[in-house]
């Protein structure tokens, strides 16, 4: 059986992919020369077995939740330089206690309801490409625990309106899968941030991202007509009007 392709828990990209050792050496030599350093040591990426994750303070109440070490480690950080450095130093001090993987709106609602009862913090997680600590579960002692709400299973284009050139799309879809679903309709969202491969529609909207690989209309704001947002106290839906 082919093992499932997994994203790295400590940084950008897929496990087992990236520059080969000799390419890494060449990059190190280039950087050492550029910054006049006598030597550059290439850090070994962490292995899951090496991590000392704090014990989860919450128990998974249903099968939507996971407390598996890989899931907790993979949702500890975003993808800034600081995040990768901490991961390479094996510093996983504040992983989420649980990671939830909803597949439907009802699942999201169930997670929020359970968290409200348990008093737990919930942090939405799209592609996890935040560079400003936006997905970190360092929520302080006010909460008995934290849940990372991974929206990657909400990844479908639900409806396409060719006449208005509009689509209703779930928030967790990553850039490439979103474009793959629009392409058969002869459409594109035309939003291309540099993190396109590993960032989500919901993350783009939450952070008001800029897609600088396109020209003229580059911000996600320009393409959003309407939002349906589940919050801990109810659902907000705005009217579908052109962005
Ligand atoms: C290599 C690299 C290149 C980048 N290039 C760009 C660029 O070109 N332009 C740019 O603007 N940014 C860029 N960024 C930053 C980042 O990719 C963007 O902020 C992106 O919009 C985040 O999307 P995400 O799905 O990864 O969100 P995440 O990192 O998962 O989350 C970001 C924030 O949004 C919240 N959130 C996520 N999904 C939802 C949701 N469905 N509902 C409510 N809240 C949600 C999270 O809780 C968090 O606070 C880059 C980052 C990297 C690492």
Image: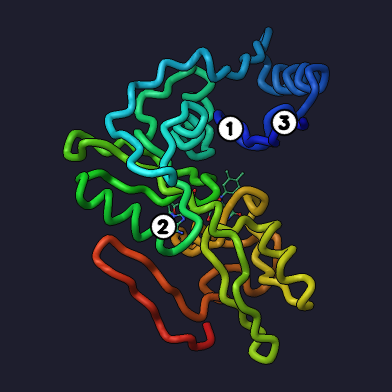
Tag 3's secondary structure?
A: loop
Q: Residue at x 34, y 56 (%)?
A: 110
Earlier residue among tags 3 and 2: 3
CB at disc 2 and ligand 1 closer than 8 Å:
no
Tag 1's secondary structure?
A: loop
Earlier residue among tags 1 and 2: 1
Badge number at residue 11: 1
Q: Residue at x 65, y 60 (%)?
A: 212
Disc number lying in front (1 or 2): 2
Residue 180, image x, y percentages: 74, 63
In the picture, measured across the screen, residue 186 lies left or right of residue 102, that is right
Q: Residue at x 40, y 63 (%)?
A: 106
Residue labelled with disc 3: 3
Q: Nearer the viewer, residue 106 or 17?
A: 106
Q: Tell me the distance, in whole angstroms, between the alpha carbons under discs 3 and 1.
A: 20 Å
Tag 2's secondary structure?
A: helix
Badge number at residue 107: 2
The answer to whether residue 196 is above or below residue 49 is below
* Quadrant where the image shows the N terminus: top right
In the picture, measured across the screen, residue 100 lies left or right of residue 165, that is left
Q: Tell me the distance, in whole angstroms, between the alpha carbons under discs 3 and 2.
A: 27 Å
What is the tally of numbered marks visible in this picture? 3
> Circle 3: is it few (<14), some (14-19), or many (20+) Cα within 10 Å?
few
Earlier residue among tags 3 and 1: 3
């Amino acid at each position: 059986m082919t093992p499932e392709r997994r994203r790295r828990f400590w940084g950008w990209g897929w496990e087992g992919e990236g520059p080969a050792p000799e390419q890494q050496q060449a990059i190190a030599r280039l950087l050492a020369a550029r910054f006049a350093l006598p030597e550059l040591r290439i850090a070994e990426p962490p292995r899951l077995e090496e991590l000392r994750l704090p014990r989860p303070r919450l128990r998974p109440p249903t099968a939507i939740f996971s407390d598996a070490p890989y899931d907790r480690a993979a949702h500890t950080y975003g993808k800034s330089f600081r995040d990768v450095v901490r991961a390479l130093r094996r510093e996983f001090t504040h992983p989420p206690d649980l990671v939830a993987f909803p597949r439907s709106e009802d699942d999201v609602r169930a997670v929020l309801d359970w968290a409200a009862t348990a008093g737990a913090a919930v942090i939405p997680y799209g592609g996890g490409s935040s560079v400003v600590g936006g997905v970190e579960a360092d929520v302080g002692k006010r909460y008995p625990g934290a849940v990372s709400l991974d929206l990657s299973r909400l990844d479908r284009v639900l409806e396409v309106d060719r006449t208005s050139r509009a689509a209703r799309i779930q928030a967790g879809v990553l850039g490439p899968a979103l474009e793959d679903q629009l392409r058969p309709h002869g459409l594109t969202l035309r939003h291309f941030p540099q993190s396109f491969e590993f960032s989500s529609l919901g993350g783009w909207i939450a952070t008001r991202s800029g897609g600088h690989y396109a020209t003229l209309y580059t911000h996600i704001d320009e393409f959003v007509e309407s939002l349906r947002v589940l919050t801990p106290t109810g659902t907000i839906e705005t009217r579908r009007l052109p962005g």
